Image (tube, rainbow, N blue to C red):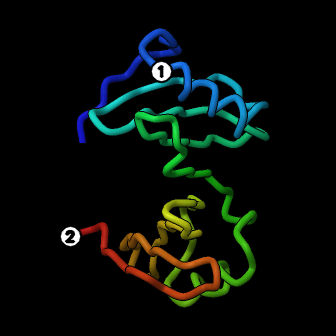
Amino acid sequence: MKFNFFKNNLHTIPKKVREQQKIIFPKSLNIEWSNSEKYFEAVFYLDETEQIARYSTDGKLVEHKKNLWPEKLPKIITEACKKFGEVMNAIEIFKDGNHVFEIIIRDKNFSRHLLLFYNDGTLLKNYPLDS
């Protein structure tokens, strides 16, 4: 997916998309916008956390991602990760009615894996990142 990046170039983002950002995330800071053929994306900070909101061209929020410190993960996700290795990075994702966690772990052999979990701790995918 090809994105065009506009640092706070608001005149390239439809008004209804900008308004949705203000309604859904009213305290968001340092918003940087980008767009592709299908989506408008806002990268911003909220509660000292980097977040990404992706909107359809008609202004509907279609995906929300939030970077998390490993210690901020729900206990059920932390416990599920332990059998795979050490948590290096975590992202909480809300998309299509699903609530998932994208976790990068490092195993005992220092190989990295991307794990996807449902919010109940069920593993969806385990992708090796080091080939």
**Residue 81 left/right relative to 70:** left
**Residue 125 left/right relative to 32:** left
Q: Which residue is painted at 48% across and 24% down in the image?
A: 33
Q: Residue furthest left?
A: 131
Nearer to the camera, 48 or 70? 48
- Within 10 Å of the Cα at label 2, are there few (<14), some (14-19), or many (20+) other Cα atoms? few
Residue 9, placed above or below residue 5: above
- Secondary structure beneath dot 2 equals loop
Location of residue 31 in the rendering, given as x and y in whole percent from the top left corner: 60, 24
Q: What is the spatial separation of the Cα atoms under label 2 and label 1, in whole angstroms?
A: 41 Å
Q: Which residue is painted at 53% across and 29% down in the image?
A: 17
Nearer to the camera, 65 or 82? 65
What residue type is disc 2 on?
Ser
- Within 10 Å of the Cα at label 1, are there few (<14), some (14-19), or many (20+) other Cα atoms? few
Residue 89, placed above or below residue 116: above
Location of residue 61 in the rendering, given as x and y in whole percent from the top left corner: 54, 45
Q: Nearer the viewer, mark 2 or mark 1?
A: 1
Q: Quadrant of the C terminus?
A: bottom left
What residue type is disc 1 on?
Pro
**Residue 31 left/right relative to 96:** right
Residue 52, quarter of the rendered image: top right
Q: Residue 14 — which label?
A: 1
Q: Which residue is painted at 56% across and 74% down in the image?
A: 86
Q: Which residue is painted at 24% across and 35% down in the image?
A: 2
Location of residue 64 in the rendering, given as x and y in whole percent from the top left corner: 56, 50
Q: Which residue is mark 2?
A: 131
Nearer to the camera, 89 or 102? 102
Residue 102, placed above or below residue 23: below
Nearer to the camera, 48 or 26? 26
